[in-house]
Image (cartoon, rainbow, N blue to C red):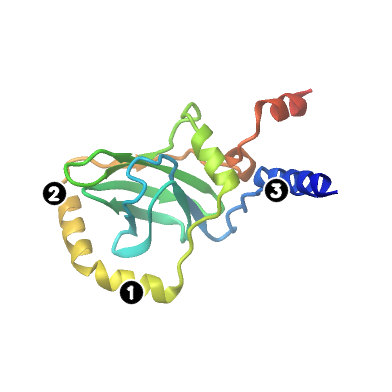
Amino acid sequence: MKKSLLLLLFTLFSFYGYTQSIAPAPTDKAVVYFVRSSSLGFAINFTYFDSTKVIGRFNGPNFLRYECDPGEHLFWARAENKDYVKADLEAGKIYVIDVIPEMGAIKAGLQLQPINSPNYKMKKTQKLLTKGTSESFTEAELAELQQQMEEVVIKGLEKYNKKESVKELGDLTFEPENLLYIKKKEKDKKTM
């Protein structure tokens, strides 16, 4: 009896682990996923910004689903260094930025890599999005973080204004089902 119950629980949890769904973007908003799938520097928090606005902070591997107004944005993140991505977003669309930790002099640095190519290797990103839950923050937590990052925002935007070139998030967007990881056997069944 115990073995049957354990088998049933294991089956349910295994099935649940691969049946997450990705919500579509609201028709009046754009969605940007910041995905940190590597465990390199896992204990170091990276802080994420939309221009002057703090949108979250988390260590990895993890991800943030950020819903925002369509139009022009400057996304950036801070660790030991800062990295920037410009974007012109459309309503109802989903975009992905891969957050790649790098070895720093004292702590982990980062690179923001906009996913602009359908050939980009997405397996780790898809696995994380399929199994995980987006980081979320209360208004109070974001307000406190915004206050803590006041000087960082000023210096971060000063550094951005001195840069000669900045990466751009292209027009490659994703349907929710394209962000889910499907095991090879399941893919084969779907194509038959």
Any part of residue 8 in sight:
yes
Residue found at the far right of this picture? 1
Is 131 placed left or right of 2 in the picture? left
Question: Percent position (x, y) of residue 121?
Answer: 48, 29
User: Separation of disc 2 and disc 1 at Cα?
Assistant: 28 Å
Could you say which disc has been placed on residue 13 in the image?
3
Q: Which residue is drawn at 33% across and 55% down?
A: 45
Tell me the quarter of the picture where residue 40 sits: top left
Q: Residue at x 65, y 48 (%)?
A: 20
Q: Give the foreground label among 3 and 1.
A: 3
Question: Percent position (x, y) of residue 91?
Answer: 52, 54
Question: Percent position (x, y) of residue 158?
Answer: 15, 57
139 in relation to 124, above or below? below
User: Separation of disc 3 and disc 2 at Cα?
Assistant: 50 Å
Question: Percent position (x, y) of residue 109?
Answer: 25, 44
Is 146 placed left or right of 155 in the picture? right
104 in relation to 153, above or below? above
Q: How crowded is the residue under tag 1: few (<14 C-alpha within 10 Å), some, or many (20+)?
A: few
Q: How crowded is the residue under tag 3: few (<14 C-alpha within 10 Å), some, or many (20+)?
A: few
144 in relation to 179, above or below? below
Q: Is mark 1 on a helix, strand or loop?
A: helix
Q: Is mark 2 on a helix, strand or loop?
A: helix
Residue type indicated by callout 1: Glu
Any part of residue 34 in sight:
no
Could you say which disc has been placed on residue 119 in the image?
none
Residue type indicated by callout 2: Lys
Residue type indicated by callout 3: Phe
